Image: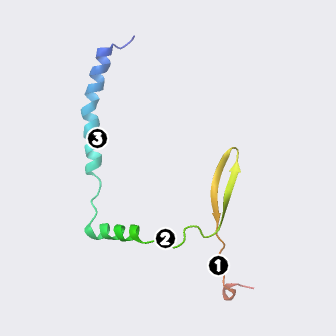
Amino acid sequence: MLVSKKALKIIALSFLPLLASLICNACASIPKLSKEEKQIITQVVKTPFTEIIKGETGFATAQGHSIWFESIQQKVLEKELLY
């Protein structure tokens, strides 16, 4: 074995403080939300869904992979059509 178990243990233990400081730094850099932003999020989460799926749905399969899709027809009024 090129590196002894004792050396690996010392290397691993020396990285623990570095890892802990990186985690603390990442958590401390997250911006705090204001009360207004929290209220908006709470309001949006509590509102009921009107209609989630509006169009025709299905699966497209190619090379062993399936992808779900939704085809929504565009609403065009006659007055908006150009001839």
The disc label shown at residue 29, or none = none
Image quarter of residue 74: bottom right
The residue drawn where x is 67% and y is 59% is: 58
State left or right for residue 52 relative to residue 59. Answer: left
Per the image, the residue denoted by label 1 is 75
**Which one is in front in this view, the residue at disc 2 or the one at disc 1?**
2
State left or right for residue 57 relative to residue 16. Answer: right
The residue drawn where x is 29% and y is 15% is: 6
Element class at badge 2: loop
**Which one is in front in this view, the residue at disc 3 or the one at disc 2?**
2
Per the image, the residue denoted by label 2 is 49
Element class at badge 3: helix
Residue 65, compared with residue 82, is above or below; it is above
Image quarter of residue 38: bottom left
Sooner in the amino-acid sequence: mark 2 or mark 1? 2
Sooner in the amino-acid sequence: mark 3 or mark 1? 3
Q: Are marks 3 and 1 in contact (CB under 8 Å)?
A: no
Per the image, the residue denoted by label 3 is 22
Element class at badge 1: loop
Image quarter of residue 30: bottom left
Crowding around mark 3 (Cα neighbors within 10 Å: few <14, some 14 to 19, many 20+) is few
